[in-house]
Amino acid sequence: MKFVAPLLLISTLLLGACAKNPVTGGHDFALISEDEEISQGRGYHPEIIKTFGLYDDTELQQYVDHIGQQLAAMSHRNNLTFHFTVLDSSDVNAFALPGGYVYITRGIMAYLDSEAELAGVLGHEIGHVTARHSVRQQAGQFASSLLGVLIAAATGQSSLGNLSQQLSTGIVRGYGREHELEADRLGAEYLHKTGYDPDNMLDVIGVLKDQEVYEKELAKNENRPANIYHGVYSTHPRNDDRLKTVVHAARKLSFKQYRDDNQQAYHSHIDGVVWGSSLHQGVVVKNRFMHPDLAFALQLPAGWKADNNPRFIEARDPNTSALIQVGVVHRATDETAGMALKRLAKNDDLDIDDTNYGATATTSVRTDDGQSRPARISAILLNNDLLLMLVGTANDKHYQAMDKQLLETNASFQHLDAAQVAAIKAPRLHIIPRTTQSFESLAQQSALEHDALNRLRLLNRSFPNGEITDLVLLKTVTLGE
C-alpha cells in the first residue's frame, strides 16, 4: 500500500500534461509547449553545427532547403518556421530536432539518386516534427524518471538515468518502430501533396537497407559500432508489408499526376560533393593524413582502416583490432610536449622520452569492458597553442607490433608549407557516363582505397552483384574538383 500515493501523484501529473496532437487531433502526454519546443531546437542547433559542421556549398544548401520548404508547407504544422541544413559529415544519416530543425548529411545524399528520393528522406524527418515525436519521447522519459524518483523515495533505490543523454540518442538514432512508421506515413502524405510519387520512399529504403547490411558486416569484421541511418531503415525490412501499406495509402488521398523524379537536377547538385572527410576536417589519401588548416601530415600504418571522426582520426588494424587515435588538444602556456603528456595522463611520474618531434611515453588504458591494455601516448607541438596527441593500444599479443607502427607514425610527422597545403585534394563524388564494362575496372580507376568494389556497387544500386552494363550513368569517387 505504500506505493498508492506516488502512483496517484504521477497519474494526476499525466492527466494534467495532455496536449493536442497536430496530426491526429487527439491528445498526447506532453510537458513541453510549442514555444518551448521551438526554443529547444534553436538552442540545440549551434551544438549540432559545432559537432558535425555545416557543409560549405551554398547552392546545395539552398536546393535542399527549397525541397524541404515545399514539403513543410504541406505538413500538419506549416505554421512552424522550418530549417533544413546539410551537415558536413560522411555519416549516412538524417534527423530532426524539436521545433522544425531538419538535418541531412552529405554522406546519405551520395546514396540517393533523385530529387524525389531526397524529398522522401526530408518528408520522413518532417513527419517526426509534425507528430512531435521528440516531445512525446521526452514526456515518456520524464514519466519514467518521475516514477523512478517516487519509487526511490519509497524504497531508497534510485532508477534514474541521464535524461538529456536519452533525448539526444532518440533524436539522432530514431524513435522506435511505431513512431518511425508514423513518420513514414506522414512523409508519404507530404510527398503526395507536393507532387512526388510516395513510392520513392520505398526506393530509398532499398538502397539504404543494402548499405546497412554491408556496413553491419564490415563493422563486425572491424570490431566497431556500425554507422547506419536510424529509423525506417533499421526498423523495417525492405519488403515490410506495413511500410508498403502506409506508403501506398498516400497515393489514394486524391488523384495526382506526379511530377518527374528530377534525377538530372539532383545529380547536378551532388556531382562534386565531398566524399569522406572534407578539407577542413583533414583528408586521408593512401593512409597519409593531411590537414590543410593546421598544415601538417602524418603517415598512418599501411593496410589499416582510417576513419575521420569529428573529435579525432582513428586508424584500426582490421586483423588485430589494434588502434591509433590522433587528436588536437590545447597547450598550456610555455608547456613542453612532455609536460603536456603528464598533464593529460594525470600522472606526474610518467617516464617521458623526448624526441625530435615531441615526446612519448608508455602507459595503459582501460577499455569499454573495463579491461586494462598497454598503450603508448605521444605529443607533438603544432604551434604555440596546440598539440597533436596520439594514443595507440592493442592487446598484449599485438602490442609490440602496434608500438613499432605508432613510433613510425610519430616520426612521419611533417609541417607543410603553403605549396604543399594548396596541393591537397579531397576525394569527391562524380557522376560520369559509363565507359567501362565492369565494376572491377571502375574500382581500379576510382580514388576509393578500401573495398572499392562493394562501395561502388552500393552507390550505383547494384549491390551485391548487379551488372554495370545495365547502367548509363555511374557514380564514382575521384581526387580533385
Image: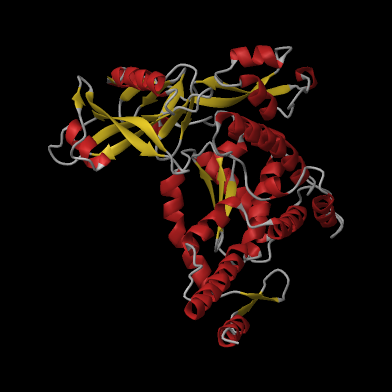
> Measured from the top left, where is residue 469 in percent x and y?
78, 17
Q: Quadrant of residue 397?
A: top left
The image shows residue 473, relative to residue 16, as above or below, that is: above
Image quarter in which the N terminus is found = bottom right
In-front residue for pair 112/272? 112
Relative depth, front residue between 77 and 349? 349
The one nearer the camera, 450 or 476, is: 450
Percent position of residue 467, x then y: 78, 20
Asked if residue 416 can be seen in this view, the reply is no
Q: Is residue 368 visible?
A: yes
Q: Residue furthest left?
A: 334
Q: How is the image coloured?
A: secondary structure
Q: Residue at x 12, y 37 (%)?
A: 334
Q: Position of residue 159 (x, y in %)?
A: 51, 67
Q: Is residue 35 left or right of residue 468?
A: left
Q: Is residue 396 above or below residue 146?
A: above
Quarter of image, res 115: top right
Q: Residue 3, position in %: x, y?
A: 58, 83
Q: Is residue 119 above or below residue 151?
A: above
Q: Report the residue at 68% width, 53% height from top.
A: 124
All told, the count of numbered labels is 0
Q: Residue at x 61, y 21 (%)?
A: 451
Judge left or right: residue 192 versus residue 441.
right
